[in-house]
Image (spheres, grey):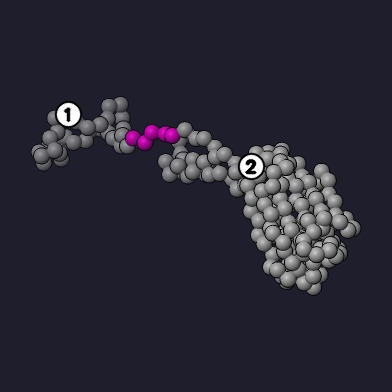
Amino acid sequence: MHYPLFLTAAAFALATRPAAAATVHCSDLTTVSATSGWSTVQKDLSIDKKPITLGGKVYPKGLGTHAPSEIVYNLDGKYATFTADVGIDDETAGKGSVEFQVFADDSLVYHSGVMKGNVAAKKISISVAGKKKLKLGVTIGTDTYDMDDADWAAPQLAEKDPVALSVPKTSKASRPDRSASVGYAAQPGAHPRNLQGRLKHILTPAEGR
């Protein structure tokens, strides 16, 4: 069966279009280890087991902890990017001070600097391509560890971009022989400038019809 050329081209375009990279929430992954300076690390809640809130924005997904804290994940080289918003949860009413750190394969790749409870959240976007381990750390800031309720809000890992399917190029389709398709053959000797010849001889019934 032969399909119209425009349908074939459309099918090739769809086949070569790369799929969107998958993204996973860190709070949905199993940790290698997770420690918190007070209580235990909370999934999708603040350390006080309330909705994670930074600057009035509520995050349905995230990790609530308290300095000093470390959360470790195995990556196995499957991911390309780590993203998150970080800050001290609104539940402290502006108190507390911490510093957020990100380690990839034990190398420090990000640190927020000291953040206090009245400071706006910071956005993180870090390449973790080819890395095998991710560690999220929170250290005590410039004061005691009281009210150091630290949030990793909406922390996500994006998988590597899928490779587009390889489809071989095709040659341009040639124009079909319309005379053959309707059962007629051109008559030799008919000259295009000879009006009589064009009327009399340009087309004659094909043999065998």
**Residue 185: x %, y % from top left:** 25, 31
Report if residue 127 is visible in the image. yes
- Which quarter of the rendered picture does the C terminus lie within? top left
Mark 1, other Cα within 10 Å: few <14 / some 14–19 / many ≥20: few
Q: Which of 12 and 149 is in front in this view?
A: 149
Residue farthest front in this picture: 142
Query: Residue 173 in magenta?
Result: yes
Q: Which mark is residue 129?
A: 2
The span shown in magenta is 169-174
Q: Main secondary structure of the magenta part?
A: loop
The residue positioned 85% from the left and 51% from the top of the image is 35
Report if residue 22 is visible in the image. no
The residue positioned 60% from the left and 48% from the top of the image is 20
Give the mark nearest the N terminus, 2 or 1: 2
Amino acid on which disc 2 is placed: Ala
Q: Nearer the viewer, residue 170 or 187?
A: 170
Amino acid on which disc 1 is placed: Pro
- For disc 1, the marked residue is 188
Residue farthest bottom in this picture: 93
Left or right relative to 204: residue 149: right
Which of labels 2 and 1 is toward the front?
2
